[in-house]
Amino acid sequence: MKIPPRLQPLVEDGLVDDVLSQLMSGKEASVYVVRSGGKICCAKVYKEIDQRSFKKAVTYREGRKVRNSRRARAMEKGSKFGRDEQEKVWQQAEVDALSLLLKADVRAPIPYGCFDGVLLMELITDADGAVAPRLNDITLTKEQALRDHALMITYIKRMLCIGLIHGDLSEFNVLVDGQGPVIIDLPQAVDASANNNAKWMFERDVNNMANYYGRYAPEVLETQYGKEMWALFQAGTLTPETELTGVYIESEVDADIDGLMAEINAVMAEAELRRARFMDEINEEESE
């Protein structure tokens, strides 16, 4: 096929030998099947920021550390240099996240490097050597759904143990090969300890998986792995070996927030009443 303009520099530099086909075009990138060093792999071409439709990217970037102070200041000011640097950080985040997943024994494509806004990585294939389908494009038996959901929960747990949250996990960001699910698309990966939105993003990821697999195995819909894992994570007791139950019982403090607020309001009202009485007494003394 004709070489896309964004891949031309990689061809000229010898990083890509040939572009074989376009795999998909999404909200943040276009993906191509390419030959590199005699090996078939995947080239993810990130779209320019003004063409990308990924919503609320700034929410996902919160908490990411930028070591270079000059780069950090430029990014805060929003200068052209700062925007360019922000794009590099956004793209590098996926390389870093994929590397962390692999070290944590979570199945994901092997990254080969990011060059001029193009991520070269492993191409996930099925048993026949064809491009592996997305989870959304296949039909599962109940047994497969239960098995793969349990595996995904294990992967999500391992990710949280290293402080990483996918942030946009769904049946559209999971491939399936002969060994089961493979997690993809992580430029928006979230720092679990530094992002104020980490908790609801994490629970949304877990619930998205439950809702999908629950189509084939309804009992999955009754599980509460998200709340269970997050409570253990906050308590500092979550480990890759932690055996999860899928059961979570709200504590009385969590369950009775309305009651707690009522008590606080009552105390404030009583304090205000005492203050008013005190002021009345002072006014009476002054009038005498």
Image (cartoon, rainbow, N blue to C red):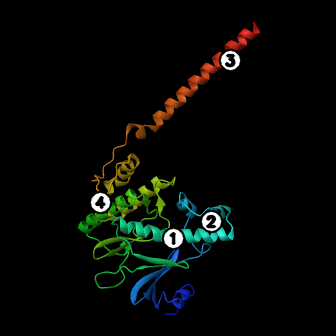
Which of 82 and 135 lies nearest the eye of the viewer? 82
Cα–Cα span, label 2 and label 3: 57 Å
Q: Under tag 2, what secondary structure?
A: helix
The first of marks 4 and 3 along the sequence is 4
The first of marks 2 and 3 along the sequence is 2
Q: Under tag 3, what secondary structure?
A: helix
Of badges 2 and 3, the one in the foreground is 2
Q: Under tag 4, what secondary structure?
A: helix
Of badges 1 and 2, the one in the foreground is 2
The amino acid type, in three-letter code, at marker 3 is Met
**Percent position of residue 246, x then y:** 30, 53
**Percent position of residue 280, x then y:** 68, 15
The amino acid type, in three-letter code, at marker 1 is Gln
Mark 2 crowd level (few <14, some 14–19, many ≥20, 10 Å Cα): some
The residue singled out by tag 1 in the image is 92
Residue 83 lies in quadrant: bottom right
The first of marks 1 and 2 along the sequence is 2
Q: Is residue 213 above or below residue 128?
A: above
Mark 1 crowd level (few <14, some 14–19, many ≥20, 10 Å Cα): some
Cα–Cα span, label 4 and label 3: 63 Å
Disc number placed over residue 218 in the picture, else none: 4
The amino acid type, in three-letter code, at marker 2 is Arg
**Percent position of residue 284, x then y:** 71, 10
The residue singled out by tag 3 in the image is 279
Question: In screen coordinates, is 211 left or right of 1?
Answer: left
